[in-house]
Amino acid sequence: MSDSWKTGALKVISGSANPELSRKICAILGVPLSEARVGRFADGEIDVHILENVRGNDCYVIQPTCPPVNENVMELLVMMDALRRASAGRITAVLPYYGYARADRKPAPRVAITAKLVANLITSAGANRVITIDLHAAQIQGFFDIPLDHLYARPVVLEHIKNRDLTNMVVVSPDVGSVERARSFAKRLNAGLVIIDKRRPRPNEATIYNIIGDVKGMNCFIFDDLVDTAGTLVQTAYAIKEHGAASITAACTHGVLSRDAIEKIHNSPIEELIITDTIPANASKSAKIKVISVAALLAEAIKRNHVGQSISELFK
């Protein structure tokens, strides 16, 4: 594609959650990162000022709602409100990581469906469209009353591992909810599929009951959408190691890595954890953690959306 697509006044604005990813995206697109000031008043309230004209422009706000989640969600909302009041032509919320996604249903009486609440807030703040990567649950797409482009980091991970020895490999789904994601990955690797029967007695705690499939003597690849406290991931690694796994590699799109997650991973049988830069991560804390970038994927999605081309073509 020639550079003629840039003539439509594309603006990319970054929140403070992941400015490095925003800079990478702009470098690939060949457009400057738009100037905006994000500050705090003395009492902690968020102060946003868009420092250039955006009237009638196609604006993309890049802001993963990662920890500190509430701060980053509120910052996103304020930035979009500022753009809307500045008469932006179209506002797209680019959420490499969509926080609150695990609260996507009512598992018990009198609990909130926060994934829907956040979707409502994003729409009310002025978003005309959302671009995100690997939602925790696909049905969250239906929580939005505006168009949503759901991207997948799978091609980025596959590109990273394509030159490895993939013989004698199985893809391990760490729970039943991740089976579809793991099956799709296994299909592209021409590998087998193993499923972990996991129960979660309370948030951020998991117990493994059964391993469905054979891992003995196999090179195991655990694939999931996110790793938070790493409890499930590490338990899965120990369980398949006890059942004879020859090697264990893991990959996830969103490396939340809360609490002592990095230490758990470093001391586990996992040989490498591949994560993407949807969330800022300090890989220097463990030699086992490898960060790969989704900047090219997001840049291509932004470009295609800007000129009205198909985004689903990216995954064929």
Image: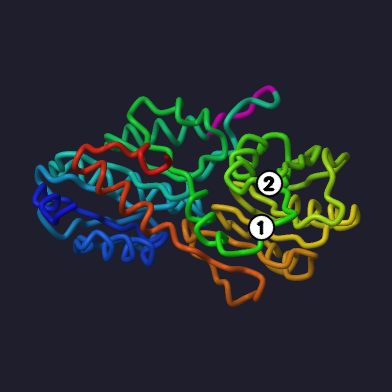
Q: What element carries label 2?
A: loop
For disc 1, the neighbor class at 10 Å (few under 14, some 14 to 19, many from 20) is some
Give the residue displayed 21% in from the left and 57% down from the top: 49
Give the residue displayed 19% in from the left and 61% down from the top: 31
Q: Position of residue 187 (x, y in %)?
A: 61, 41
Tell whether position 110 is magenta. Answer: yes
Q: How many labels does the image show?
A: 2
Taking depth in this image into account, of 265 and 160 the one nearest to the observer is 160
Tell me: residue 186, above or below residue 165: above
Task: Magenta stretch: give its range.
Answer: 109-114
Taking depth in this image into account, of 224 and 165 the one nearest to the observer is 165
Q: Position of residue 231 (x, y in %)?
A: 75, 54
Tell whether position 146 is magenta. Answer: no
The quadrant of the rendering that contains the C terminus is: top left
| Badge 2 vs badge 1, beta-carbon distance below 8 Å | yes
Determine which of the numbered discs, if any, sits on residue 53 in the image: none
Q: Where is residue 222 in the image (x, y as percent from the top left)?
A: 69, 52
Mark 1, residue position: 166
The answer to whether residue 47 is left or right of residue 205 is: left
Taking depth in this image into account, of 55 and 253 the one nearest to the observer is 253
Among numbered discs 2 and 1, the one appearing first in the sequence:
1
Task: Residue type at mark 1: give it.
Answer: Leu
Q: Which residue lies most toward the top here?
A: 109
Tell me: residue 54, above or below residue 312: below
Quarter of the image where one finds residue 256: bottom right
Q: Is mark 1 on a helix, strand or loop?
A: loop
Q: Distance between the residues labelled 2 and 1?
A: 8 Å
Task: Residue type at mark 2: give it.
Answer: Ala
Give the residue displayed 31% in from the left and 60% down from the top: 25
Tell me: residue 143, above or below residue 185: above
Mark 2, residue position: 191
Q: Position of residue 179 (x, y in %)?
A: 67, 36
